Image: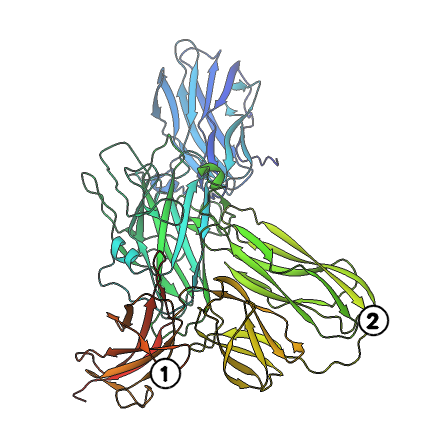
Amino acid sequence: MKLIPVLAIVGLLTMPAKAIVQCTLTAVPLQISSEGLAEPVGEVMLRCAGGQPGGALKGTLQISLGGKVANAINAQYSSWGGIPQMHEYAPGMFVALPVTVQLRESQVIFENLNVAMDVFGMISLKISGIRAEAGGTTFASMQFYGNEQLFVPTPTVTVAFSKPGLLASLIPAVLRMSGPITPTFLEYTNLVATHAPMVSVRVTEGFGASFVAWSMDPNTTNGTRILVKLTGVPAGSRVIAPDAVAGSSALQPTTTGDMGGGTAPGLYDPTGVRSLMLVRVKGSDANGAGGFVSWVVAPGPMVPSTASDMNVQDGTAWAVYEVQDQNKNMVENAQIPIWIFTPLERPNVEAVVRPTVSLAPVSDQAGSIPGAPLPRFRRGAPVGQDCELVNDCTASYWPKLTVTPVQEASYSLPSGGPAQAGYVTVRNDGGGLLEWKVAVRYRSATGWLTADRTSGFNTLNMRYDVNPKNMAQGTYDAELVYEQANAPVGANATVVIPVKLVVTAPLPPPLPSPTIQEVVNPATGWGAPAAPGAQVVVKGTNFLEQSTVTIGGKPAQILGINADSITAIVPVDVALGRALVQVFNLDRFSQPYAIEVWAVAPGLVSMRNENGALNGELAPANTGSTVELAVTGLGQAVPPVWVKIHDVWTQETPEPAGQAGMSLIRIKVPDYFPTMSTVVMVCGQVPGQEGVCSHPKDIWVKAAQQ
């Protein structure tokens, strides 16, 4: 450890000594936050004997710091910035001395010291309240100049040890859809009920009492503050955070539900045993300075259930919390849930909102800065993970990376031949958000293995391609290296999938074979689970009129074929789970493409108005009229199914649609709807399983009176 001398008490003798006074220098070292720019160090005690009974000790005491003094001292107005010089006049009792205090960049000087020794020629001085930059171990050494010579055999003592004061676990949020609608009353239960995307932040003391509660101390401006920032917030979004958070030592802590247990707003009793309580600061700046606490503590148990908007600007949201109460005998933590509501008109594109935390106020300025907050902390100080202190590093609610090849990753291909695709399932076998990245690492010749992406979230079927086009005959090895990113517990897991390619002699130029690029739902055009009896669209190349399709090894009914797409029906007897899709052109066939088959997978393909026209912006449905929904993926659903139009749910019974793989559902547009664009969603289920809903589809409605 690099030890930075922060406190040295230096003196020079300017007068002949009448006697040598024997002194002992001691200190009470404090544990301080290594992020701090203005941390209090321990008291320094000087006890001396051997002086003239009743004699006077006169002179100057100079304190030199290896770093910068952080107290705000204004000698002109007798404000010593919380650095009192004190004289013991009875055992254990002290009185402040009327000395003059001077401040230099790294020095505190006490002038005009005039203290009478007791009848035994003894004297005790105590210096306390010094603030300084944190860093390593803080030392103090001492001398004195004046009318006496003070002999201190051991002039160096330790006054502080530095350790990170803040640890955290951070769970980002992935936004895939717009909305939801923000509740009218911003209250914890209402916010949870919206199922809005949520960022979870857990902050933990790095050591006992590293979070310091606000108190009526004239030498500080605030208690420990915590600055929470979110980046990647879509434009126009509202970001909501609690006005107060009950910590782990409260009667009931505030919980997010992402870190074990359920969701709860918390229960705090200010009249009981001291417990951690964080309160939002309103009106502070982006550094966390200034402002006022927004939640008032009242007598008796309190539920901190209210919430309010965070500040949002240019894609960044931020809020400041201040410690209003804490238990000095415990290492405490607190969970902060943050809900994100994006505009309803936002395109359904994926966005990731990431949190960061720091002790606050943050600053780039060390030393005694006029008007600067006390305490304050280094900007950009690293924040370590807290799972070891909380003892949940192996908990099941953290994301867990699992990677499984769909087929054996060993290939024998002719030189110059076509590429062959392979598939790997990346799965989150834990909770929260799994972020991962993948890279190709070659063990021999390069350029023959490519992955269809470099990163992803949670569970995904990922494709890679093995291409022998420019490869000479031989054996080649490579690896797909999957690495977890931004793990909340700080340990990013790595999984390596070996891939082998044996390049054989070239083949004669083959006839074109069909290839599958993707298998999509006809309702959305996206890759999604299919259901027995449902329509799917196989997209690719080189499809012929005589092409056939198998799904899960079973022949599929063909509804239509184009050169680059085939509409087919999933066989009703196909096994649920993973199924491989293949296209055959007589004796030529595609590489298999893996899809998921669920018992129910609704897809809302089309909507027709009462007059038979396809619903659209120029052909809206009149309120009070009936709209026919063409839905695929409901073949095994137990009627009735649920249909949601705007915010109205109804139960409907599907009818045959006269087209294979489709069901017909008739719904009535409520006659009180205004003219608007909204969405329709269909949900179905089978016994013993949760319901599955279609992706919302836009519908245009026209009020009857217009």
x, y percent for residue 297: 22, 43
Which corner quadrant of the image does residue 205 belong to?
A: top left
Between marks 2 and 1 in the image, the one whose residue lies nearer the viewer: 1
Q: Position of residue 40 (x, y in %)?
A: 43, 36
Q: Residues within 10 Å of mark 1 (few under 14, many from 20)?
A: few
Q: CA distance from mark 2 to mark 1?
A: 52 Å
Q: Is residue 353 above or below residue 170?
A: below
At x 49% / y 71%, what residue is drawn? 527
Q: Is residue 619 left or right of residue 498?
A: left
Residue 128 visible at all: yes
Q: Can residue 373 be seen by looking at this rendering?
A: no
Q: Of marks 2 and 1, which one's residue comes earlier in the chain?
A: 2
Q: As drawn, is 501 to the left or to the right of 46?
A: right
Residue position marked by numbered label 1 in the rendering: 658
Front residue of 129 and 95 = 129
Image quadrant assignment for residue 661: bottom left
Most extreme residue toward the top, as rendered?
A: 120
Kindly state the secondary structure of the residue where label 2 is placed.
Answer: loop
Tell me the residue at 49%/66% (across/down). 574
Tell me the tag on residue 177. none
**Quadrant of the drawing holding the N terminus:** top right
**Residue receiving disc 2:** 505
Is residue 43 shown above or below 434? above
Residue 295 x, y percent position in the rendering: 25, 49
Q: Secondary structure at mark 1?
A: loop
Q: Are marks 2 and 1 in contact (CB under 8 Å)?
A: no
Residue type, numbered disc 1 = Gly
The C terminus lies in which quarter of the figure? bottom left
State the residue at coordinates (56%, 76%). 549
- Under mark 2, the amino acid is Ala
